[in-house]
Image: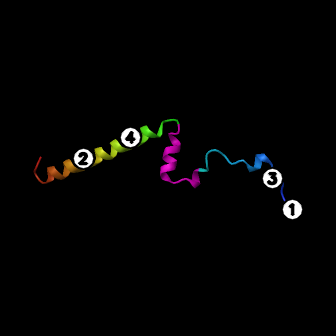
Amino acid sequence: MGEEKTTPETEKKPDHPDRSQLNAFENFYEKFSKVPLKYIDIFIGVCVAALVIVVLVGILKSKGIL
């Protein structure tokens, strides 16, 4: 009655999902797909550590310790 035939071409799903279906972290990693994930994680860790150090130095300066 109105059934559509499925062919191997219509059954295949793309390797990369639609960007609207990804969350923020997946979108970020998708942009750097050629860079190893290990290096991206190390970079994020260094940025977080630097942010913590900057905040701690600011707190210590405001209390007059530094």
As helix, strand or loop, the secondary structure at mark 3 comes to loop
Q: Which residue is mark 1?
A: 2
Q: Which residue is mark 4?
A: 42
Would you say the residues marked 4 and 2 are in contact, meaning their CB atoms lie under 8 Å apart? no
Q: Which residues are magenta?
A: 19-33
> Marks 2/3: CA distance?
58 Å
As helix, strand or loop, the secondary structure at mark 1 comes to loop
Q: Which residue is mark 2?
A: 54
> Marks 3/4: CA distance?
44 Å
Q: Residue at x 89, y 64 (%)?
A: 1
For the stretch drawn in magenta, the main secondary structure is: helix
Image quadrant where residue 45 sits = top left
Q: Which residue is mark 3?
A: 6
Q: Residues within 10 Å of mark 3 (few under 14, many from 20)?
A: few
Mark nearer the viewer, 2 or 3:
3
Name the spot of residue 65 as percent of width and height, x first: 10, 50
The answer to which of marks 1 and 2 sits earlier in the sequence is 1
Question: In terms of depth relative to the viewer, which is nearer, 25 or 20?
Answer: 25
Q: Residues within 10 Å of mark 2 (few under 14, many from 20)?
A: few
> Marks 1/4: CA distance?
54 Å
Mark 1 is on which residue type?
Answer: Gly
Q: Residue at x 61, y 49 (%)?
A: 17
